[in-house]
Image: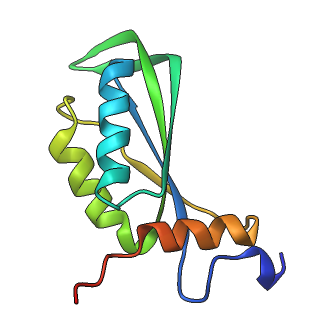
Amino acid sequence: MTADMKAPMGHVVCVVLSTAPSQQVADELAHALVESGVAACVNVVPGVRSHYRWEGRVQTDLECLIVIKTTRDRYEALESALRQRHPYEVPEIVALDVAAGWPPYLHWVVDSTAPVKKA
């Protein structure tokens, strides 16, 4: 991997995965995360069938996958915002660091999630 495939110096871009019980909830979460500046972009993928153990039973549900792009610097704020708004008692919130990517896109993620400086 070359240095030019990384995010701007000092920044790590990450992809955060979550799920939601419906398209409406996923869209509301996505909009709130982008609007608040903790996410640069959120993809909502409907029709994900999830199999999981909850309260001692294996369950299956249709959900929407939420793919969130942010930076490691903004992860804590993103997690807090997601936990505050999410309807699940224990929502999936899993962050994966991006090892490489197209530099203009990585720069855009960093710029889009930078906290707004007040004058």
Q: Is residue 10 left or right of residue 52?
A: right
Taking the spot 32% from the left edge, 52% from the top edge, the residue there is 35
Taking the spot 45% from the left edge, 23% from the top edge, the residue there is 64
Q: Is residue 92 visible?
A: no
Q: Is residue 101 above or below residue 17?
A: below
Which of 58 and 83 lies nearest the eye of the viewer?
83
Q: Is residue 86 above or below residue 104?
A: above
In this rendering, the count of numbered labels is 0
Taking the spot 36% from the left edge, 45% from the top edge, the residue there is 93
Q: Is residue 93 left or right of residue 98?
A: left
Which of 28 and 58 lies nearest the eye of the viewer?
28
Residue 50: x %, y % from top left: 46, 18
Residue 3: x %, y % from top left: 78, 84
Q: Is residue 98 above or below residue 89?
A: below
Specify the quadrant of the image occupied by residue 12. bottom right
Residue 21: x %, y % from top left: 32, 19
